[in-house]
Image (cartoon, helix red, strand yellow):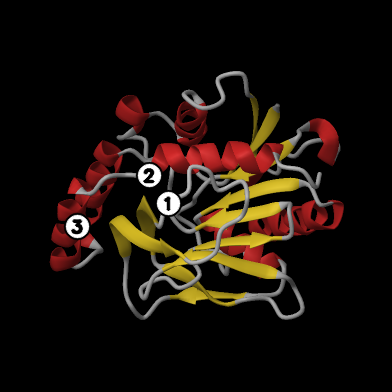
Amino acid sequence: MNIGILQCDHVRGELQPRFGDYPQMITALFANVAAEYQFRVFRVQAFEYPGSLDECDAYITTGSRHGVNDGQPWIQRLEDFIRQLHQAKKRYVGICFGHQLMIKALGGEVRKSGKGWGIGVTVNQVVHTRPWMQPVQPALNLVASHQDQVVALPPNVDIDVLAGSSFCPYYMLACGDHFLSVQGHPEFIKDYANALMEIRRSIIPAERVERGIASLQKTLDDQPFAQWMVNFFNAPGR
């Protein structure tokens, strides 16, 4: 399977020697569950896109330090592309920024949460399952790094809430058989999350940072979620 990575940002330069950039994180995530996958990177900030939707079998968006409401031309172009994918019922997975932009593109609402930063490992309860969510588990623990959240789902669009918490009710969503999104970062390893929180101490309250670092003791469900994505890409209904 050929997966198009829609790269929406870069890992901070000082962290790239240790952790690589976002496309490398995503390909590493799939290494143990779908080593045969091929990946193509499209730098959407530079307006790089496939010539046609069918150049790739499915698409994944990376996270971004930018907000979906920033109004930048590259974000508006990506929003249009997501709507094209939706119309074509092309398989798509939105991660963090991509999760929020998917919902905004379909007519929902995203804004900065009054609950503050979501950082560290967050626990979210699975509230609805799809057949491709194997192995079955009651919760989903992934690294988080966000201020914005989905606050309203699109009207007149069939959105299924798959997982959430009191902090982030719309954590994992699906639209039909072709769109899947998650607020967390399955591609982030704990060491990277720790380094990112340390760098952001000047902009995140100290108590929130300490709680985020302490949360890294929790078990991550990055590999189960990677398997869910593989199952999703291969599920009937294409």
**Observer-nearest residue: 119 or 36?**
36
Q: Earlier in the sequence, mark 1 or mark 3?
A: 1
> Of the numbered discs in the image, which one, if any, rests on residue 137?
1
> Of the numbered discs in the image, which one, if any, rests on residue 182?
none
C-alpha span from label 1 to label 2? 10 Å
**Observer-nearest residue: 54 or 74?**
54
Density class for disc 1 (Cα within 10 Å; few <14, some 14-19, many ≥20) is few
Tell me the mark number nearer the camera, choosing from 1 and 3. 1
Residue corresponding to mark 3? 201
Q: Earlier in the sequence, mark 1 or mark 2?
A: 1
Rendered location of residue 67, percent (x, y): 51, 63
Residue 63, can we see it?
A: yes
Instruction: Judge whether 109 appears above or below 9 on screen.
Output: below
Q: Are marks 1 and 2 in contact (CB under 8 Å)?
A: yes
| Element type at mark 3 | helix
C-alpha span from label 3 to label 2? 26 Å
Density class for disc 2 (Cα within 10 Å; few <14, some 14-19, many ≥20) is some
The amino acid on which the numbered mark 1 sits, given as a three-letter code, is Gln
- The mark tally for this picture is 3
The amino acid on which the numbered mark 2 sits, given as a three-letter code, is Asp
The amino acid on which the numbered mark 3 sits, given as a three-letter code, is Arg
**Observer-nearest residue: 13 or 61?**
61
Tell me the mark number nearer the camera, choosing from 1 and 2. 1
Rendered location of residue 2, percent (x, y): 71, 27
Tell me the mark number nearer the camera, choosing from 3 and 2. 2
Q: Residue at x 73, y 70 (%)?
A: 158
> Of the numbered discs in the image, which one, if any, rests on residue 221?
2
Q: Earlier in the sequence, mark 3 or mark 2?
A: 3
